């Protein structure tokens, strides 16, 4: 019997879809558990012994589920109940057909690179976890232009005066990094993407780095002038002198992708390319 976790958005639509998928999975011999992703969810999930996570929601729900699933090597498939759906590629109308193929061992997988983040503050190093999309240092609500020193493998790369910087994975290249003018990267490639946000110096441009590079972002602005955001879901204020270090994680996230649509077909649909 295959153990499956339904990881769902806290919405009526996602619950209704989850009920239907739960019935389908059980009728196909699966042991199914349902978990609602909300601030009231309680203790962390233990996925030891599970074979599949089915995320029902939008990209934010997918990112929350993927961080958990990657710790246990559990593959993830996303069923779209959000707006954009870059990560939740499967529409709910086709979810049963796709899941049937996955249960038969015929699903299409991709292994996605993740990034690990550390915070250096007052001589201490704190590990902040592994993330699938991006790490962002941006100005806080009342801050003016911020100043950030960026190094790549210890080599000074640039000083950014502006609204902040993004360090992203190829998966995260279609998120905030894309809106900030960064390039789109093929999702299962392995590189680290650096993107300045609204730089005052117009020659500051996005840079694609090898995956074995370590990117260091030092805050030169005052205390609480900058805010650190991790995958758009965790965050904290930064102080002057804080250093955020980002490098390739040892973990990967395994994703079941759409069995028929290519990445470029999804881009044409979501971004409305001609």
Image (spheres, rainbow, N blue to C red):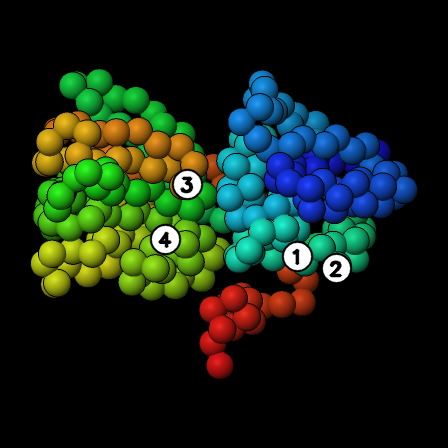
Please tell me which residue is depicted at 49% across the width and 81% down the height of the picture. 274
Q: Is residue 228 above or below residue 21?
A: above
Residue 199 versus residue 52: which sits nearer the camera? 199
* Alpha carbon separation for disc pair 4 and 3: 10 Å
Identify residue for label 2.
94
Using the rendered view, name the quadrant where residue 135 is placed: top left
Q: First in sequence: mark 4 or mark 1?
A: 1
Graded by Cα atoms within 10 Å as few (under 14), some (14 to 19) or many (20 or more), the crowding at tag 2 reads few
Give coordinates of residue 198: x percent, y percent: 20, 56
Q: Which mark is residue 90?
A: 1
Mark yes or no: residue 74 visible: no
Q: Which mark is residue 68?
A: none
Q: Which mark is residue 176?
A: 4
Please tell me which residue is depicted at 68% across the width and 58% down the height of the picture. 91
Mark yes or no: residue 41 visible: yes
Please tell me which residue is depicted at 75% across the width and 44% down the height of the picture. 16
* Alpha carbon separation for disc pair 4 and 1: 22 Å
Q: Are marks 1 and 3 in contact (CB under 8 Å)?
A: no
Identify residue for label 3.
231
State the quadrant of the N terminus. Answer: top right
Numbered disc 1: secondary structure: strand
Q: Are marks 1 and 2 in contact (CB under 8 Å)?
A: yes
Give coordinates of residue 127: x percent, y percent: 34, 25
Residue 107 versus residue 243: which sits nearer the camera? 243
Q: Is residue 245 left or right of residue 41?
A: left
Q: Is residue 209 left or right of residue 35?
A: left
Numbered disc 3: secondary structure: loop
* Residue occupying the far right of the picture: 27
The count of marks equals 4
Numbered disc 2: secondary structure: helix
């Amino acid at each position: 019997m295959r153990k499956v976790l339904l990881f769902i958005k806290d919405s009526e639509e996602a619950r209704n879809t989850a009920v239907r998928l739960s019935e389908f999975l059980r009728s196909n011999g699966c042991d199914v558990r349902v978990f609602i992703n909300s601030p009231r969810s309680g203790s962390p999930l233990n996925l030891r012994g599970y074979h599949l996570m089915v995320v029902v929601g939008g990209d934010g729900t997918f990112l929350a589920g993927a961080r958990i699933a990657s710790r246990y090597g559990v593959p993830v498939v996303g069923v779209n109940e959000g707006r954009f759906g870059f990560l939740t590629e499967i529409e709910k109308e086709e979810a049963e057909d796709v899941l049937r193929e996955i249960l038969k061992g015929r699903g299409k997988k991709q292994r996605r690179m993740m990034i690990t983040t550390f915070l250096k503050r007052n001589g201490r190093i704190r590990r902040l976890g592994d993330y699938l999309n991006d790490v962002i240092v941006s100005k806080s609500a009342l801050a003016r232009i911020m100043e950030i020193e960026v190094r790549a493998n210890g080599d000074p790369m640039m000083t950014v005066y502006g609204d902040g910087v993004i360090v992203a994975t190829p998966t995260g290249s279609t998120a905030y990094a894309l809106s900030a003018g960064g390039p789109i990267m093929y999702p299962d490639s392995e590189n680290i993407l650096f993107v300045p946000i609204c730089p005052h110096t117009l020659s500051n441009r996005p840079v694609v780095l090898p995956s074995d590079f370590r990117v260091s972002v030092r805050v030169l602005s005052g205390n609480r002038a900058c805010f650190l955001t991790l995958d758009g879901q965790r965050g904290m204020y930064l102080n002057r002198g804080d250093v955020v270090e980002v490098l390739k994680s040892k973990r990967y996230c395994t994703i079941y992708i759409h069995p028929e649509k290519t990445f470029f077909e999804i881009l044409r649909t979501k971004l409305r390319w001609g």
